[in-house]
Image: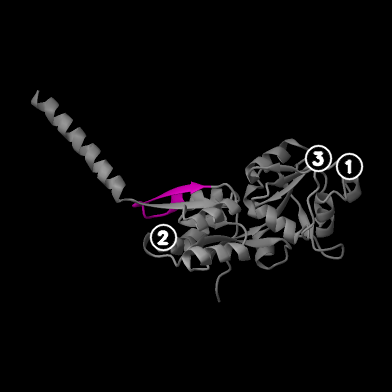
Amino acid sequence: MKISNLKVLYFALAIISTSLFAQDKKTITIKGSDTMVILVQKWTESYTDKNVQFQVTGGGSGTGIAALINGTTDICSSSRPLKSQEIQQLKEKYNSSGVEIKVAVDGLTIFVNKKNKITNLTLAQIRDIFIGKITNWKDVGGEDHKIILYSRENNSGTYEYFKEHVLEKKDFDPAAQHMVGTAALVNAIGKDKWGIGYGGSAYASDVKELAVAIDENTKPELPTEANILSNKYPVSRYLYFYLREAPKDDIKKFVDWVIGKDGQKVVKDVGYFPLKKKK
């Protein structure tokens, strides 16, 4: 009987101890870019301070920025810079323009099915395909078949970057299928021989990456680390963390780790590219 009572006591103490330990943990919320979800999750799993716990969600860069403005996330992950009106909203609400932290580099990749014979396109060809001016693969050196377009949804930072820098602000062909997340887009192209889409370079495992040329007189380049960091690949961008104010305490420690040696190794392991080393 006494032994049984001791067991109950030890069990109760264990529950109390676990509960108190959980209460002592600092929770950092990170919300935003679907492109960055796999990277952010890997960062939080690899982070050495286990007294900090994380809540990581996607939804798109626009969703993360809205959460930052509304005060419902500590860190916004974004694959595009803040817009002027978003900066103004932060100023009005927090008397701060927000803090931008570059955390990685991405080569915005053009994906096709592995059975597609096409290996490279120019920026003009990519633009004409996605605005509906080119609709058949034979017109860019491929087989005689209709091109099937896959795009990201319009709250995605990747969508906005692609529209601005590749489509030159022209509208997508209405026939484009807008996918929720790059993983869904890549999965669709992996099953569709005639599909084409775009997204973060880390998602290229089950599809083919196309080499991209600035124009017809330029050598097409693949989105490799060397080509991106030397600016040979024509469609690259930074990935960002945004905060309402300068990071401090646990958030500062985490951010410093992310942009430090260990955090940048994770970037490379996931399939994105580390920040250029300062000379």
| Residue name at image x 48 percent, y 68 percent | 95
Q: Is residue 41 magenta?
A: no
| Residue name at image x 64 percent, y 50 percent | 155
Dot 1 lies on which element?
loop
Q: Please provide percent x and percent y for residue 102.
A: 55, 64
Amino acid on which the number 2 mark rests in the picture? Ile
Q: From the viewer's perspective, tell me whether residue 100 is left or right of residue 213.
A: left
Work out how far the residue at label 1 is from the one at label 3, CA to CA, in angstroms. Answer: 9 Å
Amino acid on which the number 1 mark rests in the picture? Glu
Q: Quadrant of the N terminus?
A: top left
> Who is closer to the viewer here, 101 or 262?
101
| Residue name at image x 77 percent, y 45 percent | 196
Q: Which residues are magenta?
A: 44-57
Q: Please provide percent x and percent y for residue 163.
A: 74, 56
Amino acid on which the number 3 mark rests in the picture? Trp
* Nearer to us: label 2 or label 1: 2
Dot 3 lies on which element?
loop
Work out how far the residue at label 3 is from the one at label 2, CA to CA, in angstroms. Answer: 45 Å
Q: Is residue 56 magenta?
A: yes
Q: Identify residue for label 3.
A: 194
